[in-house]
Image (spheres, grey):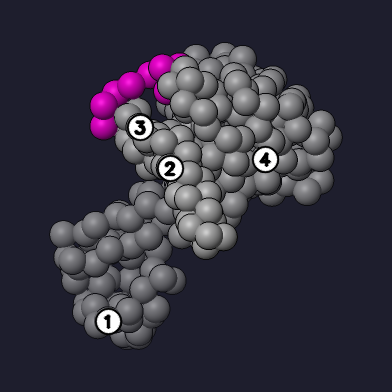
Amino acid sequence: MKDIRLFFQLTACFLIISCSMVGKKTPHEIVWQVIGEKKSSQSVVEYIKSGGYSIQEIQSIAQKSIEQSQCSLAYDLVKNFQIDPNLRSDTQTLFQCLLLNKYYQDALHVLKSGAAPEFIRHESVYRNDALEEASAWGEIEIVRELLRLGERPSSRAFFLAVSGHYHRDYDKSLSILDLYKKYIMKIDINYEFVKSPLLYEVATERKYSLQQRLHLSKAILELGADPNKGVKRTEHGKTGRNIDYIETAYMAVSGTPELTALFLAYGADAEQGRAKEYAKFIANLIPGDEAKQGLVVQIKDNLVLVQTASGTRWVKIEEIRPSK
């Protein structure tokens, strides 16, 4: 008799649990409503509110949302159900997801609500730093909040902020430059992004007016930028000989006297301006050409045989100079 009673009790419990699960979607199914069925985050939130989900289940849905980069849905769940803003998947935090996907106001809100500013870092991904990301897109309020929370700018963050490489807004360049000045001792002012030093980038980019480029260039030079840093270029000769040289910012803006005068005032080497012509001379050097050392008779690998009044001699090709 006791066994029969126990059987009916267990059956009743199973039925109650089963009934409570009828029509209840899994976290994967709910997130798919947003991805595949194009449901709005708000409609999903309303469905969850009416579906009898526990806070643990809602947290699982939010984590699945972050995993699938459905940051807006995850944010709405955190906001509506008072979930810890430090929610994360295996690959990214909620804050990281929002910032990388350009939900800037939401990213700022979770930061101010207690989310940690650190990213989950991946060696194969370069977007690994919150300040670099906020700086790149000129998100000044997020930059301020990150600094308040103890984050410090890297050389890349400084470059991305000041150059306007992505945000393309002069006022934002100036504002973040001002915010980062106090950290300049730990920043490499000559840091290269995509093989271009900051001063070169600022001076040659046409997204800013001449006056804006002058102002930014001077500010960078005053912080210690080297006007003789530049970008590697290659002169391809008709001989098949290719000669590398460095094109400095001074060389790149040779047709803009306001900028060249500024660079010269801060130590630009005017002699480097001849680097391109010299590279062109060496790249196209052939027997019969006149060099300062004499008449070019033969070129073998990196040696040049020159004829002078006193005879012939071999000279290293990098030592050969134009006759004029």
Between 262 and 110, the one nearer to me in the picture: 110
Q: Residue at x 81, y 31 (%)?
A: 148
User: Are the residues tagged 2 and 1 within 8 Å (C-beta)?
Assistant: no
Alpha carbon distance from label 3 to label 1: 79 Å
- Name the residue type under label 2: Leu
- Name the residue type under label 3: Gly
Residue 82 in the image, given as x and y percentages of width and height: 67, 27
Q: Earlier in the sequence, mark 3 or mark 1?
A: 3
Identify the residue under disc 4: 86
Q: Is residue 269 visible?
A: no
Q: Is residue 43 visible?
A: yes
**Secondary structure under the numbered disc 3 in the rendered image:** loop
Q: Residue at x 24, y 67 (%)?
A: 241
Alpha carbon distance from label 3 to label 4: 30 Å
Q: Is residue 87 left or right of residue 22?
A: right
Res 15 label: 2
Identify the residue under disc 3: 23
